[in-house]
Image: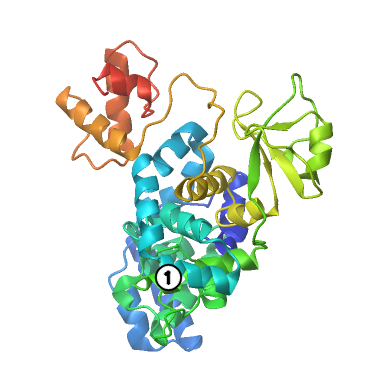
């Protein structure tokens, strides 16, 4: 997800806005689709391209349902971090840092964004290109445009821009797969962001963020540079608060590191907290959890999805693939989240115990949550439907 999408979509979600999601009958959707084709024609998109991308589109309830919620805002941060920054993603990132060292070095030199940061965005957005989304971009955008509500015009514009990208030959029609909101490619750009910031880094004449790793990585670096990333400035520091701290908090409540030290904060790594670099204090799990002083470079990471949890996931992954340390303070929970491998194992354990959740795939959907609730009831636990360590171990997980 990218800055331009978040400015219009994710911030709205974070503010509690939801799309109006009427039960659009297929007939009314088809009438809306005809209007979108006509609008594309007026925007200069040829008929063949419009038909190639919009042909066969049907009303998709799942897209509308997903538009009303996102995991960054509903999932406990210890769950979110556990599956986004797990051992496999770290291990794969370290290997790919070496495999693509020449490209990443060239990208870093061209845009001034450290290679491990670019790599971390790639890892979080698509698991290094291995998973790019469940939705066909033009069809998802058509559904959102036709659903009505306050964002309909925005999604119509994103759809027209998708058609224009296809028309000029940057991305083959069949390759537009991504998120429910229309982001696509290995680092998930919205069409508007794509047209403004995508880069043809491999110089083949196409800005292809789907099939070209160099283009995807360079475009990501270009995005972060545009968002204000400054080379050599850390994203932030994990800190310890003084007892009874009542001072300012919030990403935008900035002060110099020296000022924070005078307020009683200290770096957990033992290094001095000094200098004029400005940072804000964030407490992603409240006062009992980890605390971080974050710089404007964190703002650049935040802008990729307008989510504090998301920004921290990129920050932590970038730290770990470059040989740094994990966060030191524990999340304030006695029921930690599960890695992707553990989530897959949890589904297998649920099936084995008779709580059928369907074919295990490691992804937590309605069937898995219902299976977890049944298992929790069986063991006399509160029925949460949450994939945590407690139910995992109750079922025999190690």
Callout count: 1
In terms of depth relative to the viewer, which is nearer, 266 or 340?
A: 266
Could you tell whether 192 is left or right of 384 in the image? Answer: right
Q: Position of residue 166 (x, y in %)?
A: 39, 81
- Give the answer, above or below, for where 378 lies relative to 200: above
Q: Residue at x 65, y 33 (%)?
A: 283
Q: Position of residue 339 (x, y in %)?
A: 36, 36
- Give the answer, above or below, for where 358 lies relative to 31: above
- Give the answer, above or below, for where 247 lies relative to 252: above
Could you tell whether 192 is left or right of 256 in the image? Answer: left
The quarter in which the C terminus is drawn is top left
In terms of depth relative to the viewer, which is nearer, 92 or 383?
A: 92
- The residue sitting at the top extreme is 380
Determine which residue is flagged by label 1.
102
Q: Residue at x 43, y 71 (%)?
A: 103
Q: How is the image coloured?
A: rainbow
Residue 209 visible, this orientation: no
Q: Position of residue 6 (x, y in %)?
A: 58, 57
Give the SS element for disc 1.
helix
Q: Residue at x 40, y 81 (%)?
A: 170
Could you tell whether 232 is left or right of 212 in the image? Answer: right
In terms of depth relative to the viewer, which is nearer, 124 or 374?
A: 124
Residue 97 visible, this orientation: yes
Residue 361 is drawn in which quadrant? top left
- Crowd class of label 1 (few under 14; some 14 to 19; many from 20; radius 10 Å): few
Q: Position of residue 76 (x, y in %)?
A: 50, 32
């Amino acid at each position: 997800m990218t800055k331009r999408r978040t400015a219009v979509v994710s911030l709205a979600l974070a503010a509690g806005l939801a799309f109006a999601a009427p039960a659009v009958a297929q007939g009314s959707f088809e009438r809306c689709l005809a209007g979108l084709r006509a609008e594309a024609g007026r925007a200069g998109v040829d008929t063949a391209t419009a038909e190639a991308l919009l042909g066969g589109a049907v009303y998709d309830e799942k897209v509308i349902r997903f538009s009303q919620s996102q995991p960054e805002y509903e999932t406990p941060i210890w769950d979110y971090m556990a599956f986004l920054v797990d051992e496999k993603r770290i291990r794969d990132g370290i290997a790919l840092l070496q495999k693509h060292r020449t490209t990443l070095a060239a990208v870093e030199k061209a845009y001034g964004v450290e290679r491990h940061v670019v790599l971390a965005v790639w890892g979080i957005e698509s698991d290094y290109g291995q998973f790019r989304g469940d939705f066909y971009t033009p069809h998802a955008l058509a559904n959102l445009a036709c659903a009505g509500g306050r964002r309909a015009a925005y999604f119509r514009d994103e759809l027209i821009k998708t058609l224009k990208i296809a028309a000029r030959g940057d991305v083959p029609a069949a390759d537009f797969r991504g998120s429910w909101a229309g982001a696509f490619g290995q680092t998930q750009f919205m069409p508007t962001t794509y047209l403004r910031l995508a880069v043809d880094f491999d110089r083949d004449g196409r800005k292809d963020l789907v099939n070209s790793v160099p283009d995807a990585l360079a475009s990501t670096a270009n995005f972060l540079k545009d968002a204000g990333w400054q080379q050599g400035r850390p994203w932030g520091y994990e800190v310890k608060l003084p007892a009874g701290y009542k001072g300012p908090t919030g990403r935008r409540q900035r002060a110099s590191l020296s000022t924070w030290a005078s307020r009683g904060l200290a770096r957990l790594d033992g290094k001095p907290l000094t200098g004029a670099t400005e940072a804000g204090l964030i407490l992603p799990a409240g006062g009992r959890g980890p605390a971080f002083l974050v710089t404007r470079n964190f703002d650049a990471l935040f802008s990729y999805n307008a989510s504090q949890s998301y920004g921290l996931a990129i920050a932590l992954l970038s730290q770990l693939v470059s040989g740094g340390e994990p966060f030191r303070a524990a999340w304030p929970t006695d029921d930690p989240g599960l890695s992707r491998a553990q989530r897959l194992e949890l589904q297998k354990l649920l099936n084995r115990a008779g709580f059928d959740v369907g074919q295990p795939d490691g992804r937590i959907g309605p069937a898995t949550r219902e299976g977890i609730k049944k298992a929790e009831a069986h063991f006399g636990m509160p029925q949460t439907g949450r994939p945590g360590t407690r139910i995992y171990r109750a079922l025999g997980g190690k």
